[in-house]
Amino acid sequence: CEEMTFNEFVSLANKRFWSTEEDMQITEALNFVSDILGEEQANVSWYETMHLLIQLKKNQSVLCPISRELLDEASIMEIMGRMCIIRSFNLHVRISLPLLRLTLPEEDWWQRVGTSVNRLPHSDTVDETESIAKLTARWKPKCMARQLRYNRRLLLTETKMFFWDGVLTSTTTPTPLSHDEYEDPKEVRVVKLNRVRAAQSRLIQLRSPIERIRHSVFGQLQRELRSWPSSSLRRAYVGKGHGGQKRAFKVKFIGEGVNDYGGPYRAVFEQISQELQADEIKDSDGCLLPILVPVPNRSSKLGENQDKFALHPSFKDSPDLMNFFGRILGTGIRNGLQMDLDLAPTIWRPLVGLPLTNKHLESIDLLTAKRVQTLREIGVEQFSEGISETWEELTFTKFSSDGRLIELVPDGSSQHVDKENWKTYCTLTVAAGLHEGSQALQSFYAGLAAILPTELFPLFTDNELETMICGSKDMDVEMLQKCTEYSGVSSDAPHIVAFWDVLKEDFTAADRAAFLRFAWARSRLPKSVRDFPTSFKLQTSVIADGADPDTYLPHAQTCFFSLSIPKYSSREILRAKLLYAIANSPNMDRDIRLHNAEGW
């Protein structure tokens, strides 16, 4: 590739007309390149980007943000030229974002009329007085905030994250340091939790959902923190010798012999994620705790997103719990902890102010979406001659995600669908499926808003927000390798090479998540290399002279993200021993656990 003058570059950039959608695809391609190379845009070279684009253009089977039509129409040099312009545009936006107002005029109006303190960006998710709703639906003046939201895909993810991190830092509650650097400040209080009582095997035996909440780690933490001001949860204190772990409080596990140098703190957020998504209980409204419910596709085992969960639709009786869910999730984000949560797209899109459509209903409830689609396709023909036997028993009702029969209109169970109202039935069914649990979502958002600068959410896409809050479900082994320190052992030692091979090739995604939980008390890695608070420390286990390494197990120190591996004789033995250690380490420092201590 030869160097070109500025005039030659201008000529290249103006060679074809670029649509906004094409520019958005190119921006997403820049994000894609950064993710593949594990580098920030400023550190990605022209040649690395061009090489990747050439590979993408040749290999049509690879998923690429740039459409195949654009790759065929535009040359590599034209795309590269446009990438340069978009990168330059983002540098200017990065400087300008702190000076711009990011809320819409109609959102400011909601604040002034006092209808909601922390109203969701998406105005269709919460019911308000009809007159005000109609007024703000019509009143949508042009403003920079609206343009930013419309063109959010033109902003590089790192442009948004640079602004987000700056606002997060500036809104962090300051914590005065103690005179003794090894002594925690009094503002960082200790929270006592009983994980023994919260074991899932014990919670399952409790018939009442209220009792299960009370005994769970989620419920115990909620009782401990409910009187705390939100400012206390906006702390990000890092203690000496805590492995760089930010925190808002310290944890004391009753009955377990472990000190909180980071591991127990992370374990709390990890256990809450597991409790909220445990759906093995058949009589518990879908999950162990009545906070989340499996999406209908998970229950029916049909369609996509069968691993996702939605907010409990009949949650409105206990809004404090959903508000706390938002607060603890926000605390985790401030402290660099991506919680292992698989939430439905119908949660993420309203949080960033994006609308919900029939496509999103199908992504969580395929049966309902197909039923409505079928009714719309054949409804005109069937209802033109009167009601058919197929729809004879159809009434204005719908089953919710937690199995309740809800009425779409007052007295809907006795109102049959006929040729006069079948279109209304379809509209109400779709709306009920998309906005199910809207009151719970509002409480959840209010909890997030108490801890995080939620005004910035509309800058992100729903996928970007999910990744920022929950991280990636599958562990990036190559990124972990980049963040690894080797203590007393070489990276090319046979048992170290075998360890990485096992992680990459032998372990499933679930195995890798379990390994991370074993080694670091969390199941998802940070978003990027620069977000790691500490390096992963890998070393060889110290064993007795003449002893057989194959009889020893790996040893992890979760507080310090450290793993010691014996010099196993084969990769197969290493894999078996590592899986055994992972599966049989439910508690921390169980060798000094006191079974006659408090909690047992």
Image (cartoon, grey):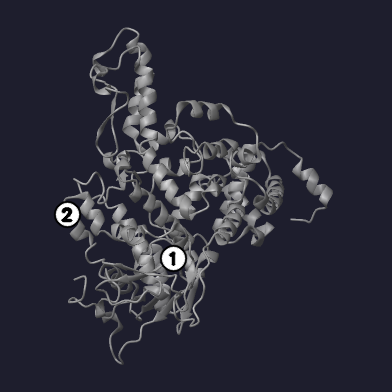
Which disc, if any, is residue 256?
none
Q: Which residue is mark 1?
A: 248
Around disc 1, counting alpha carbons within 10 Å, would you say few (fewer than 14), some (14 to 19), or many (20 or more)? many
Q: Position of residue 551 (x, y in %)?
A: 26, 81
Which quadrant would residue 494 be assigned to in this image? bottom left
Residue lying furthest top = 385
Which quadrant would residue 105 be assigned to in this image? top right
| Three-letter amino acid code of the residue under disc 2 | Leu
Of tags 2 and 1, which is closer to the observer?
1
In the rendered view, tell whether residue 53 sits above or below residue 501: above
| Three-letter amino acid code of the residue under disc 1 | Ala
In the rendered view, tell whether residue 362 sits above or below residue 174: above
Of residues 401 and 372, which is closer to you in this image?
Answer: 401
**Secondary structure under badge 2?**
loop
Q: Position of residue 511 (x, y in %)?
A: 34, 62
Residue shown at 59%/61% (left/top)?
Answer: 39
Around disc 2, counting alpha carbons within 10 Å, would you say few (fewer than 14), some (14 to 19), or many (20 or more)? some
Q: Are marks 2 and 1 in contact (CB under 8 Å)?
A: no
- Residue 51 visible: yes
Q: Is residue 367 left or right of residue 138?
A: left
Q: Which residue is mark 2?
A: 206
Disc 2 from disc 1: Cα separation: 31 Å
Q: Quadrant of the N terminus?
A: bottom right
